[in-house]
Amino acid sequence: MSETPAETAPESTPLRRGWTTGACATAATKAALTALITGEFPDPVTITLPKGQEPAFPLAFETLGDGYASAGIVKDAGDDPDVTHGATIVASVRPLPPGSGIRFSAGSGVGTVTLPGLPLDVGEPAINPVPRQMMEDVVTQTCAAHGLPADVGITVSVPGGEALAQKTWNPRLGIVGGLSILGTTGIVQPFSCAAWIHSIHRGIDVARAAGLTHVLGTTGSTSEAAAQEIYNLPEIALLDMGDFAGGLLKYLRRHPVQRLTIAGGFAKLAKLAQGAMDLHSSRSQVDMEFLASLVPADRADARLTERILSANTALEVLEITRENGIDLAPSIAEKACESAIEVLRGAEIDVDIIVTDRKGNILARHP
């Protein structure tokens, strides 16, 4: 998953697609199994993705031992700022007794599921359903091509994965010991931020499965800490929505909880108050006219309005209005709440908003 929301590259720069951890694990599985059967590693190794693409992956290393084979592929995430870019995805395969089928294990650096709510049972290695299916398909096809039953154990590992996982949602999702093997198409679209939004959805699933009735969506660690001073919610209730308010709200619309708190800085929540659902600086801008419209009519003289319209940032507007004895934060909180409720479209969720400054001081709450 992405560690931070993506920055937008210049429009003239072509963006490279990359490959998911699931695609890399599938290719490594095919290479290792082929070597286990034939004694030779295909390099590069070609696989078929769910939508029919056939990428080829060079092997980073290969090992053929007594009754097992391993292959590793370095993940190339293309131009997507993914924490697993450059990580080595390793698959080790071994034959199992007849009738065993295909079994998955988590090796070093791959997590294990410990909480309900994910699309995997508790105790299972954190290898998501689509990558599992991709690996099962290559095992079935490879074994069939050599007249063998598909009774194979697959262990996926990621050297250094446990440290990388601390930069992801996995600890909060109850995935312990390492990363998840992810992907639905096999392809990482640059700057799609799909992994972040996927993590928000899984966080909601885990919270609901645990019976939680109150979740907290925040734009960052500062606002999270401020809200936690008030609510002290369990860790699995904390949803690091980042800039993706829309991803949070639209999923909750279909999978509601009783109460949602959204906490964020003044500038981010000013965008939400305007109706923006993607709060990143490259994909939405603060509307100074909107901020000017929040100034009470009896205080909105021409000079003040001009200063607001000429301001470079929302924080500058906040300071200008404060100098004039005007507090915009409560209006931002109220309007942000209205925007969130509108996106929820009647879902029975109580929404409240907390606006903070950069130091984590609470500027306003609504209601």
Image (tube, grey):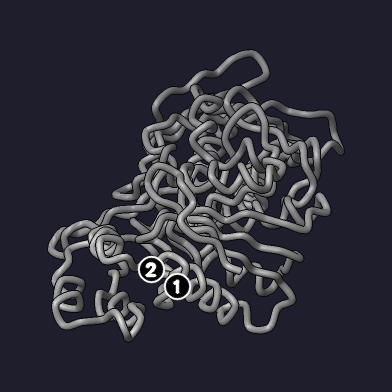
Amino acid type, mark 1: Ser
Q: Between 301 and 109, which is closer to the camera in this rendering?
A: 301
Image location of residue 26, percent across then percent down: 55, 43
Q: Between 231 and 55, which is closer to the camera in this rendering?
A: 231
Left or right? Give the position of 76 relative to 143: left
Q: Between 86 and 133, which is closer to the camera in this rendering?
A: 86
Q: Between 124 and 48, which is closer to the camera in this rendering?
A: 124
Kindly give the residue lying farthest to the top in the view shown: 66
Q: Which residue is mark 2?
A: 328
Q: Secondary structure at mark 2?
A: loop
Q: Residue at x 67, y 43 (%)?
A: 173
State whether residue 20 is above or below residue 53. Answer: above
Residue 44 falls in image quadrant: top left
State whether residue 255 is above or below residue 140. Answer: below
Which label sits on residue 331?
1
Q: Residue at x 66, y 62 (%)?
A: 260
Quarter of the image that includes the C terminus: bottom right
Instruction: Answer yes or no: is residue 342 visible.
Output: yes
Amino acid type, mark 2: Leu
